Image (tube, grey):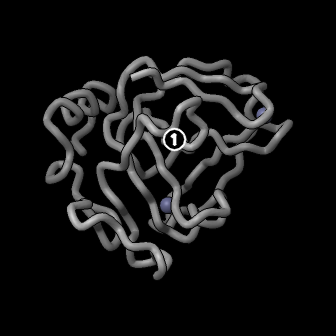
Amino acid sequence: MNLQGRCACGAVRYKLTADPLIVHACHCLDCQRITGGAFVINMWIESRCVEADRSGLKSYLLKGGSGQKHEVFFCPTCGTYVWSKYHIAPGDCLFVRAGTLDDPSVIKPDVHIFTRSKVPWLELPKDARKFESIYQIRNVWPAASLQRLDQSAGAPA
Ligand SMILES: [Zn+2]
Ligand SMILES: [Zn+2]
């Protein structure tokens, strides 16, 4: 997959050097607020697989639904949110917004999370994997992704 993207003004550009570990569609209220949309599509990937000049990015600290910190990174010129770091998530990983890809159509959510706050008019596909809130990584992720996470985290998920 060609996973390159940028912010609206182009000052921030990035390239993912591997496929995402998993792709979340998150329907939580924080994600609705910071995107201004019905949900966000996040590509969960190791930080080291995100090639970018990070020096120009600004960040803002939110308190996530879990009570743990959620740090949102954005371009200070145009304000586009390009990725997040969830302090509760294992491993040194980022959640990159799939909507900022040059071609967002190459990405499809593997799971829908926080569907308890999903907007009522949106109907998810019948075969979609969905969770009211979060889920157990070990029960959901493919083996190859679990292995990669273990390598990046050094801690059990
Ligand atoms: Zn920008
Ligand atoms: Zn969310």
Q: Position of residue 114 (x, y in %)?
A: 40, 69
Q: Quadrant of the N terminus?
A: top left
* 113 sits left or right of 53 in the view: left
* 38 sits left or right of 127 in the view: right
Decide: few, some or many residues near mark 1? Use Cα within 10 Å; few <14, some 14-19, many ≥20: many
* 81 sits left or right of 139 in the view: right
User: Residue at horizontal 61%, vertical 48%?
Assistant: 71
The residue singled out by tag 1 in the image is: 98
User: Residue at horizontal 82%, vertical 40%?
Assistant: 78
Task: Report how many numbered discs are placed on residues in the image.
Answer: 1
User: Residue at horizontal 43%, vertical 33%?
Assistant: 92
Does 84 appear above or below 112? above
Q: Position of residue 66 (x, y in %)?
A: 45, 66
Q: Tell me which corner region of the image, top left, top right, bottom left or bottom right, holds residue 21.
A: top left
Element at label 1: helix
Q: Quadrant of ligand 1?
A: top right
User: Residue at horizontal 22%, vertical 41%?
Assistant: 156
Q: As rendered, which of 105 and 7 lies closer to the eye?
A: 105
